[in-house]
Image (tube, rainbow, N blue to C red):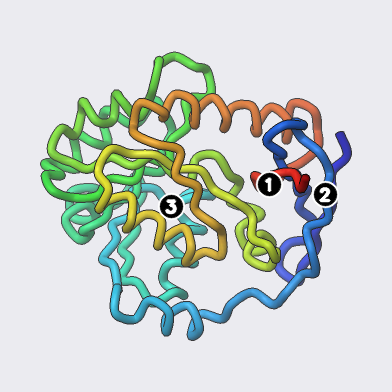
């Protein structure tokens, strides 16, 4: 398996892999790099759909998504350990959960009721302690519409990934179709193509896929990568 390097002015290098349905990981041409859409262009695409987002977590993932969604014109409030989790959660019609797995229970308890809100679970169960961490999130926030997303990618390559044509893919899943439509739009807003893999019963597979990506990136020393599912040409 050989990686394809992608460079940009914002990210020095990102390894890119394309997953073909019948042949496993294979290096394929990713096409010409194109300029990433400007914040104004993304805002014009979504100006009728400004989303209020509360981002719980200001680390690599939470911080990067906050910046990119703000550039896309969304109303984002972010908070970390020293901020009021309840106030951040109350701000959003969509709440991003981007904290360590060990903090999930305490953070959701501090967030208060999330009834009716879209709850994006971007957490990773690195040690595979849960059958599905997203299922645990759904138990802890029973009134929320949980969507597993943004965990199976790498924040350091978000900017470079936005320049790929065709775009890199990002898998997500959830049970509520309206919530998934909202999240698909937020994925598109950072320049990636959303791939709906089904209901929340698929979250364990998404989490395992994320662990594999992390192992390839750091365990094998290949570095953060993006992926794209591509059907082989006959």
Tell me if mark 3 has few (under 14), some (14-19) or many (20+) residues whose alpha carbon lies within 10 angstroms of its own: some
Give neighbour class at mark 2: few <14, some 14-19, many 20+ (Cα, 10 Å): some
- Where is residue 35? Give x, y as percent: 69, 77
Identify the residue under disc 3: 58
Distance between the Cα atoms at labels 3 and 2? 35 Å
Report the quarter where the C terminus lies: top right
What residue do we see at 42% from left, 84% from top? 44
Q: Compared to 6, does 122 lie above or below?
A: above
Label number found at residue 159: none
| Other-residue count near label 1 (Cα within 10 Å), few / some / many at <14 / 14–19 / ≥20 | some
* Quadrant of the snapshot with the N terminus: top right
Which of the pair 67/87 is nearer the observer? Answer: 67
Q: Viewed as shown, does residue 217 lie left or right of 5?
A: left
- Which residue is rendered at x = 33% and y = 50% of the image? 180
Disc 2 on helix, strand or loop? loop
Q: Point out residue 4 in the picture as x, y percentages from the top left corner.
A: 84, 50
Which residue, given by chain and number where applicable, does mark 2 sit on? Answer: 28
Residue farthest to the front? 234
SS at circle 1: strand
Residue 184 in view, yes or no = yes
The residue lying toward the viewer, choosing from 180 and 150, is: 180
> Residue 183 placed where, x, y %?
37, 54
CB under 8 Å between discs 2 and 1? yes
Secondary structure under the numbered disc 3 in the rendered image: loop
- Left or right, 117 with reference to 193: left
Answer left or right for 90 relative to 41: left
Residue that badge 1 annotates: 230
Q: Please state which of the two labelled residues, at mark 1 or mark 3, is closer to the viewer.
A: 1
């Amino acid at each position: 398996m050989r990686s394809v390097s992608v460079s940009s002015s914002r990210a020095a290098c990102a390894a890119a892999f394309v997953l073909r349905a019948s042949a496993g990981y294979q290096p394929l041409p990713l096409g010409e790099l194109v300029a990433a859409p400007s914040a104004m262009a993304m805002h014009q695409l979504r100006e009728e759909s400004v989303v209020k987002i509360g981002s719980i977590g200001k680390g690599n993932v939470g911080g990067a998504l906050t910046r990119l969604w703000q550039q896309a014109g969304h109303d984002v409030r972010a908070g970390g350990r020293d901020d009021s989790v309840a106030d951040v959660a109350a701000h959003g019609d969509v709440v991003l959960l981007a904290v360590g797995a060990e903090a999930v229970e305490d953070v959701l308890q501090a967030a208060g009721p999330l009834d009716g809100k879209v709850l994006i679970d971007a957490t990773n169960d690195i040690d595979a302690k849960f059958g599905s961490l997203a299922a645990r999130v759904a138990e802890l926030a029973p009134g929320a519409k949980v969507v597993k997303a943004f965990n199976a990618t790498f924040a350091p390559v978000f900017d470079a990934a936005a320049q790929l044509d065709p775009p890199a893919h990002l898998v997500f899943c959830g049970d509520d179709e309206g919530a998934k439509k909202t999240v698909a739009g937020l994925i598109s807003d950072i320049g990636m193509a959303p791939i709906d893999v089904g209901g929340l019963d698929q979250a364990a597979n998404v989490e395992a896929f994320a662990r594999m990506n992390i192992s390839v990136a750091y365990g094998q020393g290949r570095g953060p990568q993006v992926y794209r599912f591509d059907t082989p040409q006959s």
